[in-house]
Image (spheres, rainbow, N blue to C red):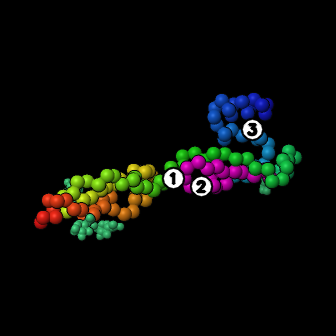
Amino acid sequence: MKILCLVMMLLLQNLEIDCEVSLNWSEWGNCKATCGHASRSSRCRPNIGTGRNCPNGQYRNQWCRNLPKCPISGGWSDWGQWNECSQNCIQNRTRTCTNPPQQYGGNDCIGNATMFASCNLTACKAL
Ligand SMILES: *[C@@H]1O[C@H](CO)[C@@H](O)[C@H](O)[C@H]1NC(C)=O
Ligand SMILES: *[C@@H]1O[C@H](CO)[C@@H](O)[C@H](O)[C@H]1NC(C)=O
Ligand SMILES: *[C@@H]1O[C@H](CO)[C@@H](O)[C@H](O)[C@H]1NC(C)=O
Ligand SMILES: *[C@@H]1O[C@H](CO)[C@@H](O)[C@H](O)[C@H]1NC(C)=O
């Protein structure tokens, strides 16, 4: 019976099928994280009724379902090439918040996406 139960558990991909029905399992505990992949466990307790006891401290684990994805904070790309020097002797370069992009409620990149510097074109020196 136990083997049949384990096969069903695998076929149905359902870890909630209880193959140890007569053991005295506690309620499922809290998931070990609030996002991403996490498991929860229940403890096997002394069984007064059937006398079917498991060794003290025995746990069973289960993957938590439907946890939200963990927040991913954004990171800056490298700076791009400097753009051409403008008439007012300022050049700029940019970076993007794509390494990685902010996702699932993570923080946005901190800082400026554009950086400026003075530059010296012959044209603007003459100004
Ligand atoms: C299962 O464990 C709980 C908590 O230890 C206990 O109160 C209860 O009597 C046990 N049930 C059986 C059937 O042994
Ligand atoms: C950056 O430089 C380019 C080329 O000179 C210019 O077209 C663009 O407006 C500048 N961007 C900013 C934000 O000043
Ligand atoms: C970001 O841009 C602001 C406004 O242009 C400027 O005052 C500040 O100094 C910049 N910060 C850095 C780190 O360049
Ligand atoms: C631009 O030229 C001026 C005058 O020659 C110089 O003082 C300044 O440091 C130069 N700036 C840059 C960014 O090269």
Q: Name the residue carrying label 2.
A: 33
Secondary structure mostly taken by the magenta-highlighted segment of the chain: loop
Tag of residue 19: 3
Was residue 35 drawn as part of the magenta stretch in this picture? yes
Circle 3: is it few (<14), some (14-19), or many (20+) Cα within 10 Å? Answer: some
Under mark 3, the amino acid is: Cys
Q: Earlier in the sequence, mark 2 or mark 1?
A: 2
Q: Name the residue carrying label 1.
A: 70
* The C terminus, quarter of image: bottom left
SS assignment at label 3: loop
Residue 124 position (above or below residue 54): below
Residue 111 position (above or below residue 57): below
Q: Residue at x 63, y 45 (%)?
A: 63
SS assignment at label 2: loop
SS assignment at label 1: loop
- Disc 3 vs disc 1: which is toward the camera? 1
Under mark 2, the amino acid is: Ala
Residue 120 placed where, x, y %? 22, 62
**What is the spatial separation of the Cα atoms under label 3 and label 1, in whole angstroms?**
32 Å
Residue 64 placed where, x, y %? 60, 47
Residues in magenta?
Answer: 28-45
In terms of depth relative to the viewer, which is nearer, 58 or 28?
Answer: 58
Q: Residue at x 70, y 47 (%)?
A: 61
* The N terminus, quarter of image: top right
Circles 2 and 1 in contact, beta carbons < 8 Å: yes
- Disc 2 vs disc 3: which is toward the camera? 2
Q: Earlier in the sequence, mark 3 or mark 1?
A: 3
In terms of depth relative to the viewer, which is nearer, 38 or 58?
Answer: 38
Residue 76 placed where, x, y %? 40, 55
Q: Looking at mark 1, is its residue's CB closer than 8 Å to ligand 3?
A: no
Residue 11 placed where, x, y %? 66, 29
